[in-house]
Amino acid sequence: MANLPIKTKEMHSHHFDSTIWNDFKFRNDDIVISTYAKAGTT
């Protein structure tokens, strides 16, 4: 298994909540793109 980044803190605001990732099971071929809402990323 690849060396995945380790979550070091949780972020909470009216824009985001990082706790949604706590139970997510990553696979070796997953790609996560994270941007602010309505940032124009498609």
Image (tube, rainbow, N blue to C red):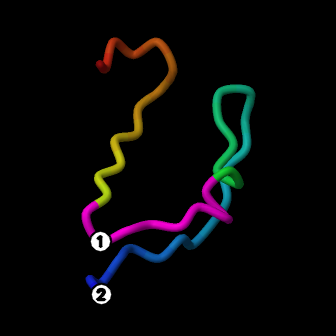
Name the residue type under label 2. Answer: Met
Q: Closer to the N terminus: mark 1 or mark 2?
A: 2
Residue 32 appears left or right of 24: left
Which residue is depicted at the point 31% across and 20% down? 41
The label number, if any, that marks residue 38 in the structure image = none
Magenta span? 21-29
Q: Is residue 11 above or below residue 13?
A: below
- Residue 2 falls in image quadrant: bottom left
Q: Residues within 10 Å of mark 1 (few under 14, many from 20)?
A: few
Which residue is depicted at the point 47% across and 26% down? 36
For numbered disc 2, what is the local secondary structure?
A: loop
For numbered disc 1, what is the local secondary structure?
A: loop
- Asked if the residue at tag 2 contacts the one at tag 1, i.e. Cβ–Cβ closer than 8 Å, the answer is yes
- Residue 40 falls in image quadrant: top left
Q: Which residue is mark 1?
A: 28
Which residue is depicted at the point 29% across and 71% down? 28
Which residue is depicted at the point 58% across and 61% down? 24
Q: Which residue is mark 2?
A: 1
Q: Is residue 41 above or below residue 19?
A: above
Based on the picture, tell me whether residue 17 belongs to the magenta stretch.
no
